[in-house]
Amino acid sequence: MSQTLNEATVLVVGAGIMGAGIAQIAAQAGHQVLLYDVGAGAAAQAITKLSATFDKLVGKGKITAAAAAESLGRIRVADRLADCAAVGLVVEAIVENLGVKQQLFNDLEGVVAADCVLATNTSSLSVTAIANGMQHPERLVGMHFFNPAPIMQLVEVVSGLQTSPTVAEGIFELSARWGKVPVYARSTPGFIVNRIARPFYAETLALLQEQASTPSVLDACLRAVGFRMGPCQLTDLIGHDTNFAVTQSVYAANFYDKRFVPSLVQRELVDGGLLGRKSKQGFYDYRDGATNAVLIEMAAPESLPRAHTIQVHGSGAVAEHILAALDRQDYRYEQVTASDWQGLAVDGAQLRLTDGRTATELGSEVAVFDLPVRFAENPVLAWAISGRASERWAQTAPVWLQVLGFAPQAIADAPGLVVARTLAMLINEAADAVQQGVCTEQAADAAMKLGVNYPAGPFEWLADWSVGAVVELLTHLDAYYAGERYRVSPWLKQKQWLTA
Ligand code: NAI
């Protein structure tokens, strides 16, 4: 099978953004490529654009002029599907509509040979459903590229209920030969990336809806984890209409499981036409001369705060970071390793790493801080003060965070703050995906890093955190909000019992 695929002529159906990119990849990998589109002249136009793309690649020294000319020479327009009988692989990248895709594959089966592999680049439709009605549904497989296809490394190889394992393996191997990193996924709503990524947007949108903070602060907190953009910046870039549509489709496809419920905050942006960069307004203002909110930076304390007694509670990475910071500044302290919380006690007042409970629930002289993931120089970190705290502790707690090397950003007393709840929910969604046989842990990590440029995969974050802490945090969020959204994945529960 793969030998045949390696040498196959590839038909790309749909010459839009994705189809053109896929044609380029296949041609550069040495395949003869036919490009077909229903739009009059669309395929020829795409080839003209590809010619310019190849020129740019030559200009940047990425490929030689000879290689560019050869690749471009391999791509030809197909005027009619009926002319494509000799192809060994079809990659479909047409409009995202189930009926239209089903019709296309039915038509294709009347044209191509019995052993031709049929692949769909659908990003949200069920591969099982697209195959419904085909004579040979076992030869249909998802080959989900990411935009821009020639640059993004990930390909989700998606199997529907009837997809033959040999066909999926063939596309997996071919994707690798095309220089991609393929991962196997089972056809379920959102596949891997579009499913696991939902909480990245959803948690920030939920915090905005609760008025816990502002887009600029929430974005900064998540950039501190290593995300290139915060959720507000990223949805402004993607377009709120597009991002909202994906969220709605995953929500509907999961029988309206409240876990995936879309956000009123985002719907209002869509309703108002504030779609992000493309309409020049979204969470941020991109119009000429516009100014956007920036972070409130606390000046460094003039003198270090003093205390009679300082205790460092807990053990692990956060406690070690605190100990090192205190040592550097010659503080004397006592270590309370066997504590049920992590953080700093200063003359009895507490500065605690969030465990998913609010500071107000935890006591009066209590402040909570967010999960630090990278201990870079002065990373932005959210914190919140108990509604019952004294003015004095409300003033001093952030100064102690500065002593510990953070740039504190005060937010409302929302459980799980920003980073902790977002990462916990990303891990939880990934855990559910593994539990349900959608993908492996390794595939989930690779998919999130290569499909959406996450700085780490959900299971890598989990390895640096702890199953117990994630379950505890989610359990507290679940109790606080009393809905379906924060229910703990069975996978995490099982893991916790196994490692207890
Ligand atoms: P696009 O709108 O840029 O291109 C679609 C092309 O298909 C158009 O040129 C249209 O004329 C043509 N077309 C429509 N119906 C056709 C038919 N029956 N036969 C032949 N050609 C037909 O769309 P885009 O963004 O390239 O998306 C294509 C597919 O790839 C969709 O299934 C989409 O969900 C998927 N996808 C899109 C991504 C993106 O970021 N744009 C990422 C990954 C997948």
Image (cartoon, rainbow, N blue to C red):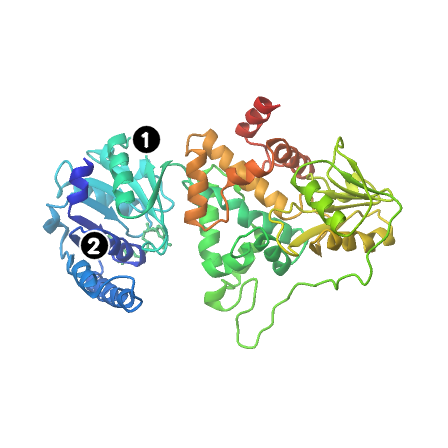
Give the quarter the ligand 1 occupies.
bottom left
Q: Residue furthest right?
A: 308
Rendered residue at 18%/48% (across/down): 10
> x and y percent of residue 248 in the render?
47, 47
Q: On the image, which quarter does residue 125 sit in?
A: top left
80 up-or-down from 429: above or below: below
> x and y percent of residue 465 in the render?
60, 38
> x and y percent of residue 138 in the render?
24, 32
* Amino acid, disc 2: Ala
Disc 1 designates what residue? Answer: 161
Q: On the image, which quarter does residue 472 sit in?
A: top right
Dot 2: few (<14), some (14–19), or many (≥20) neighbours within 10 Å? many
Q: Is residue 198 left or right of residue 143?
A: right
Q: On the image, which quarter does residue 78 sit in?
A: bottom left
Disc 2 designates what residue? Answer: 27
Dot 2 lies on which element?
helix
Dot 1 lies on which element?
loop
* Amino acid, disc 1: Leu
The disc, 2 or 1, on the residue closer to the chain's N-terminal end is 2
Q: Is residue 418 left or right of residue 98?
A: right
Out of 85 and 133, give the one closest to the viewer: 85
Q: Is residue 243 left or right of residue 412?
A: left
Position of the N terminus by quadrant: top left
Determine whether the beta carbon of the residue marked 1 sits less than 8 angstroms from the nearest atom of ligand 1: no
